[in-house]
Image (cartoon, rainbow, N blue to C red):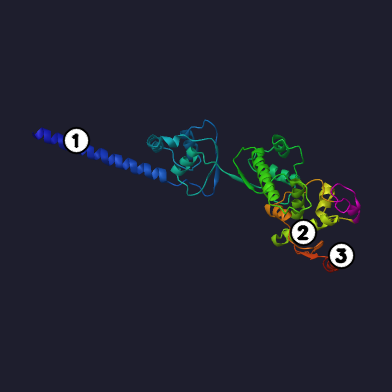
Amino acid sequence: MKFLLGLLATLMTLALIAAGGAYWGLKQLDAYAAAPLILETPRQLEIKPGTNVRHLIRQLAEQGITENDWRIKALLKLHPELAQIRAGLYEMVPGETLAGLLEQLSQGKVMQFPLTLVEGRTIAQWQTELAQAPHLNHDVDAFAAVMAEQGDTGLAEGRFYPDTYHYEAGQRATELLTQSYLRMQQELAAAWEGRDKTLPLKTPYELLTLASIIEKETAKPEERGWVAAVFVNRLRKGMRLQTDPTVIYGMGERYQGNITKKDLRELTPYNTYRIDGLPPSPIAAPSRASLQAAANPADVDYLYFVSRNDGSHVFSRTLAEHNRAVNEFQRKQK
């Protein structure tokens, strides 16, 4: 009997020791998983296809970012899902824990990079910005490639919607531009459907072209409707648009910041001082606000406007009023 009691006591003691050891081990794992990475600034982490999680931890330990010991093996045994890390480019930030990093890698929460296509800019300007976008797989003819994929045989200018898009490292620029192209088709269709049906515009493309001119002429939301009205009123009367942004676009790389009288007299497809009606294509990417202004101009009878040199404009109904405004705000500047 004494033997049995002694054996039972021994077993209980061993069980308590084992339980205590297990508790201690779990506490060690919890502390290991919750330990913040040793980082002073954010760092990028590239996981290549086929990377083993233990090999990764060893590399991070060699860089002094985390520790590599028996606990990683035990942690992965308890949470095998953390070992299924996915390839991609990730960001490690100060204060992030080892468990948080492994969860991020196992869920494939890769870095997202923003790309902003700014309204009022041209395809040529956007091409330069695409080429400078970090980690973006960019083809020189990305815009043309999207146009071809969409079966659009027209010019790319104005066909892509300005907005902020997000991409992963290595993603092709054509994927983002396809989103932009389709978005512009939607926005243009909505503007055309809701347009003033008395507009002197025959096609959605003409609306797009007019909207691009409005976009270049003013950045003030309160003026877009009036600028649109000036151009629509001129089209109705058969007057030339006489807008400088179209002249600049027609000059291309020759434009160096100034328009001369010679430039205004030059006959190009985009010189609205010399041609009747709209130019043959948009001259930039219009925003939704400019599309809506072109579709529904303000109900005013203005025919002229001139810059105040502060971003705003003076609008006039007659040439005499316009000339007075030009004398006040432009000629005195020269």
Q: Which-is-in-front pick, marks 1 and 3?
A: 3
- The residue under label 3 is which amino acid type? Leu
**What label does residue 145 carry, if any?**
none
Q: Quadrant of the N terminus?
A: top left
Q: Is residue 165 above or below residue 325?
A: above
- Write down the region rendered in magenta: 261-276
Residue 151 location, quadrant:
top right
Viewer-side residue, 9 vs 163 = 163
Count of number-bearing discs: 3
Gap between marks 2 and 1 measured at Cα: 94 Å
Viewer-side residue, 126 vs 95 = 126
Residue at image mark 3: 319
Residue at image mark 1: 11
Q: Is residue 201 magenta?
A: no
Residue 204, image x, y percentages: 74, 46
Whether residue 286 is visible = yes
- Mark closest to the chain's N terminus, 2 or 3: 2
Identify the residue at the far front of this view.
198
Q: Is residue 169 left or right of residue 331?
A: left
Residue 144, image x, y percentages: 73, 38
Gap between marks 2 and 3 measured at Cα: 16 Å
Q: Secondary structure at mark 3?
A: helix
- Mark closest to the chain's N terminus, 1 or 3: 1
Gap between marks 1 and 3 measured at Cα: 107 Å
**What label does residue 229 carry, if any?**
2
